[in-house]
Image (tube, rainbow, N blue to C red):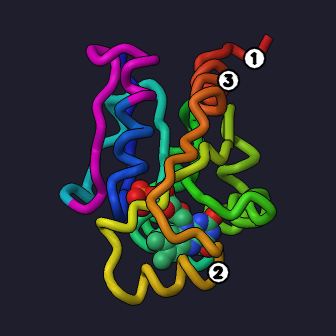
């Protein structure tokens, strides 16, 4: 039985994180779904589910929220992992709490913020302006937390003892 990794990405960082998770879990044991391309996923055929997205202006993408809401009952019956990408370290915890419903967070084997990137070459004019103003950062930077990704996968795979 395989793990489904369901995600969405704005500038490609969450997709990089998903690729790393797929490496750690084994490519043959995982199937990835980008919610931009596929919304109706038959989760019943998977043993475990990982859901991820990224934070923009304090919020996770709406399509991740919708997916969680629409699939709540099946998600509560399977081993679950929840993660977000973000760059605003002081807000990590509160953003995580807002991103996923409490019921799912309580049920999840692992819930983590795995860092993120600012990719100026992929931002539009307004995004550049906002990021510069709020973070003071003016050049592309990668702060993907590889250790956190490994910890996340270890917790997700653990059998709780
Ligand atoms: C316009 C904009 C707003 C952002 N707002 C937040 C934020 O409120 N909190 C945060 O932690 N990160 C914020 N970020 C950082 C993103 O979460 C980070 O760039 C992430 O790696 C994006 O992943 P993605 O390319 O998969 O969408 C913001 C980034 C951009 C470009």
User: Which of pointers 2 and 3 indicates the residue nearer the eye?
Assistant: 2
Residue sitting at the far top = 161
The numbered mark, 2 or 1, whose residue comes first in the sequence reads: 2
The residues colored magenta run 20-36
The residue drawn where x is 62% and y is 59% is 87
Quick check: 61 above or below 105? below
The numbered mark, 2 or 3, whose residue comes first in the sequence reads: 2
- Quadrant of the rendering where the N terminus is positioned: top left
Q: Is the shortest distance between ligand 1 and the CB of mark 1 under 8 Å?
A: no
The residue carrying pointer 1 sits among few (fewer than 14), some (14 to 19) or many (20 or more) residues within 10 Å by Cα, namely few
- Quadrant of the rendering where the C terminus is positioned: top right
Whether residue 42 appears in magenta in the rendering, the answer is: no
Residue that label 2 marks: 134
Q: Position of residue 66 (x, y in %)?
A: 44, 69
Q: Is the shortest distance between ligand 1 and the CB of mark 2 under 8 Å?
A: yes
Quick check: 3 above or below 25? below
The residue carrying pointer 2 sits among few (fewer than 14), some (14 to 19) or many (20 or more) residues within 10 Å by Cα, namely few
The residue drawn where x is 59% and y is 18% is 157
Left or right: 154 as drawn, with respect to 47:
right
Residue that label 3 marks: 155
The residue drawn where x is 48% and y is 46% is 51
Q: Position of residue 130 (x, y in %)?
A: 53, 85
Instruction: Using the rendered image of the protein, determine whether residue 55 is visible from the camera's viewpoint.
Output: no
Find residue 107 and report its image quarter.
top right
């Amino acid at each position: 039985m395989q793990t489904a990794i369901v995600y969405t990405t704005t500038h490609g960082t969450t997709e990089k994180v998903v690729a790393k998770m797929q490496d750690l879990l084994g490519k043959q044991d995982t199937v990835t779904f980008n919610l931009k391309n596929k919304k109706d996923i038959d989760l019943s055929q998977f043993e475990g589910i990982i859901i991820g997205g990224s934070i923009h202006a304090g919020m996770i993408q709406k399509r991740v929220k919708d997916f969680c809401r629409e699939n709540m009952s099946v998600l509560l019956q399977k081993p679950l992992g929840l993660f977000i990408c973000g760059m605003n370290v002081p807000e990590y915890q509160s953003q995580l709490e807002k991103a996923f419903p409490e019921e799912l967070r309580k049920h999840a084997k692992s819930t983590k913020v795995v860092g993120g990137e600012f990719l100026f070459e992929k931002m539009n004019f307004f995004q550049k302006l906002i990021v510069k103003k709020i973070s003071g950062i003016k050049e592309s930077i990668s702060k993907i937390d590889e250790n956190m990704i490994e910890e996340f996968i270890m917790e997700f795979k653990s059998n709780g003892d």
